[in-house]
Amino acid sequence: MTDFAHKTWSRAISRAILMIYDTQHPIYGPARRRQQPVMRQVAIIGIGKTAFGSFPDLDLRSLAVEASQACLADANVSPTQVEAFHLGNFAGPAFVGQNHLAPYIAGAMGITGVPATRFEAACASGGSAFYHAVMSVAAGIQDLVLVTGVEKMTSQPTAKVAEILAGAGDMSGEGRAGATFPALFAMIARRHMYQYGTTREHLAAVAVKNHANGAMNPQAHMRKAITMAQALAGKPIAEPLSVFDCSLISDGAAAVMLAPLERAAEFTNKAVRILGIAQTSDYVALDCKTDITAFRAVRDAGAKAYKMAKVKAADIQFAELHDCFTIAEIIACEDLGFVEKGKGGPYALSGETSLTGSRPINTSGGLKAKGHPVGATGVAQLCDITLQIRGEAGERQIERHSLGLAQNLGGSGATAVVTILGAQ
Amino acid sequence: MTKGVIYTETVVHAAPEHLLAEAPYQLAIITIDENDSDHAGNRLTVRIDGDRVVIGDKVEFLEDRDNVPFYKKLA
């Protein structure tokens, strides 16, 4: 190389380097000036739950307080140490006629002087309250955040409950036309059956498995195993879904305590790490979606959570999936990449998702058998994953339990929260 | 929006409070017919009057009742 060529090249290279690092450069500058956020690692340092079921003697606040206090005790945190209270609740105002729920519940525990806020995202209210709490702790705004989810549903007659739940859909269109939530998921199931050959037996297999798991969960609403024949002979709710394809109308509450991972050891020696988390959204009305056999919000949230956790779908050892209806668990397995699109039905029937299978799903009994107090569900899923990771799931304890995933779905797919939890 | 094809459907047995008297009823999402230039390909949630329909059936607009579009199967 001649001296001249050498000089030209080194000048060109140094100019290129300067250009990339120049914070005032017209093209590269803005990206250089933007500070990369420093996210803290976040851990779950305590969990607490009420039993799920029909409790005529317990009001909404009593349930929320019971779960929260159990959680505070588990985390060795006193109410005065709590720096923020996040409440997941879907329809307290409609179900029990009480608004301003977060400070109403926090105050009953002596938690005052902190942000106390209710998060509403239909059946993903709990997951959303949790997501925003994790963001707060990760960003360094608060250290100790209590997240509680609660719903009190059984004080209303079933038709009224169906009416209130329909409000998670588009009331100006599908709701007005008579689409209950079972009806929306029935239409999803019909289309999935049409496109992929999914059968009634595939749906029923989800119910049979989740009831078997729920029978072993002392806090489950429905502690009763069912047979395939029973599941197939259920009373129709919205065809092709029968009563055994639908989750339960339940009362209940669940809570988790968050702290930065670096402080977790001050409180507990069994902290569980939040490795990845994402919340995403999509259209509310089912008829606005191009393909109703998949939930785009779940796919997006799953992809983001996997990326953040630096894991792949194949690495996930067990999961709590949002089985509000049996078809929803089948589609979640596809959306999260556990199986190929369209193969969720045969996967449900294969036994791979049972307690002794290669990837147990809904070891708690799921929404189907554990119960589905709407606002509590997203938080309860995290309690159940934590319980497995800690090795405290008793009769339901699975062997491989160091990496679990929770998927919480709002409405017919307008909100999704996916969280990946791991052992320390 | 006079004609469409059934994209999916269900027969609702457990109705919400305001429709208890009408259950069981058929609900469907239809894809508006390609010959309807303004809305071709759009989807709409509708009620089905008369004969039950399945995916792929052609339907036509019948009437609006309380702002709910009712469609019926094309003979």
Image: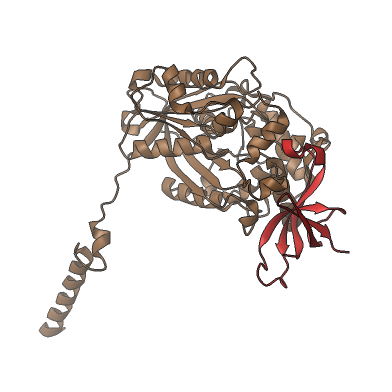
Left/right of residue A291 with respect to residue B62 in the rendered view: left
Q: Position of residue A36 (x, y in %)?
A: 28, 51
Q: Residue furthest front?
A: B66
Residue at x 82% of width, y 42% of height: B24
Figure check: B38 above or below A209: below
Left/right of residue A288 with respect to residue B58 in the rendered view: left
The colour one sees for chain B in the rendered image is: red
Q: Who is closer to the viewer here, A73 or A215? A: A73
Provide the letter of the chain coloured brown: A
Residue at x 27% of width, y 60% of height: A31
Q: Is residue A174 visible?
A: yes
Q: Position of residue A296 (x, y in %)?
A: 56, 53
Figure check: A252 above or below A128: above
Figure check: A196 above or below A125: below
Q: Is residue A197 visible?
A: no
Residue at x 53% of width, y 43% of height: A316
Q: Who is closer to the viewer here, A210 or A8? A: A210
Figure check: B47 above or below A152: below
Q: Quadrant of residue A157?
A: top right
